[in-house]
Image (tube, rainbow, N blue to C red):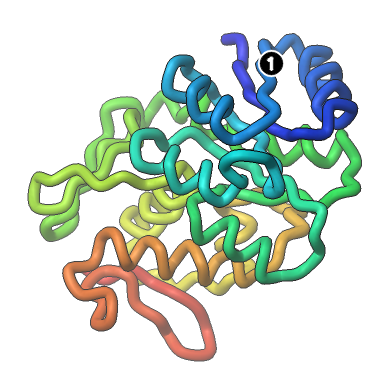
Amino acid sequence: MTIRALVVDDEKLIVKGIVFSLAQEGWQVDSAYDGEEAINLIKKETYDVIILDLMIPKFNGLEVCQIVREFSNVPIIMLTAKGEDMDKIMGLEYGADDYVTKPFNVLELKARIKAILRRSVHPDKENDKKIIEVGELRLEVSGKRVFLNNNEINLTSKEFDMLELFATHKGRVYNREQLLDAIWGKGYPGDVRTVDVHVRRLREKVEPNPGQPQYIHTKWGVGYYFKD
């Protein structure tokens, strides 16, 4: 299967370098230089992953994430030239699956992309028709679709992976490091607060009352677990 990627950045040299590197993998790569152009392409084409700069014209990266998440679960990796933690966390809050801080090594970027694609592009064949039902929640594994009271919920790829992990291991408590390893891959250099952001977003989407979780619970001082 040929991977199709979209690179969005207003710095043309950066775009050129990423496109060249990904094309060497045999991937088909498109490019856009502002948020409006990116959104139009994403609505028209089907991509396996989007590499999206935070500071781009017309719509910035956070705005693009927010708009794209209204109609697509495509994995998004945010690029940011800023080192502040708040920018990284806000990128995840708006629907990005991961982030890479500029300047970056293109090998690191490719490793992050491959980690995200590993499950979404090459799902476990044994789970192709697997359906998980817990209370009013139903997970259709092959299509990465989630329903609450028969209403479909729009989750990102990482949110779905985390929910699937919890739902298939009910009662098991995972600490943040274990969740990073399981969802983002061993050796992932990201902050453990990434886990907290994703758990909070999951609760907002799947819990009838996020303030009093029915499914995803916190074991204080340890981590998170799923309760039927």
Comparing 211 with 111, the one in front is: 211
Residue 213, position as x, y percentages in the image: 26, 76
Q: Residue at x 85, y 17 (%)?
A: 20
Instruction: Say whether residue 170 is left or right of residue 118.
Output: left
- Of the 4 image quadrants, the one containing the N terminus is top right
- Which residue is nearer to you in this view: 126 or 96? 96
| Image coords of residue 82 (percent x, y) | 80, 60
Q: Residue at x 70, y 67 (%)?
A: 191
Name which residue lies at 27% across and 34% down: 130
Q: Is residue 114 visible?
A: no
**In screen coordinates, is 140 left or right of 59?**
left
Instruction: Tell me residue 142's x, y (percent).
Output: 34, 29
Most extreme residue toward the front is 58
Classify residue 225 by image quadrant. bottom left
The residue lying toward the viewer, choosing from 203 and 70, is 70
Specify few, some or many for label 1: CA neighbours under 10 Å numbering under 14, 14-19, or 20 or more: some
Which image quarter holds the C terminus? bottom left
Where is residue 127? Give x, y as percent. 35, 32
Judge whether residue 106 can be spotted in this image. Answer: yes
SS at badge 1: strand
154 left or right of 190? left
Q: Nearer the viewer, residue 66 or 183?
A: 66
What is the tally of numbered marks visible in this picture?
1
| Extreme-bottom residue of the structure | 221
Residue visible at 63% across and 49% down in the picture? 98
Q: Look at label 1 and name its amino acid.
A: Val
Q: Quadrant of residue 33?
A: top right
Q: Which residue is mark 1?
A: 29
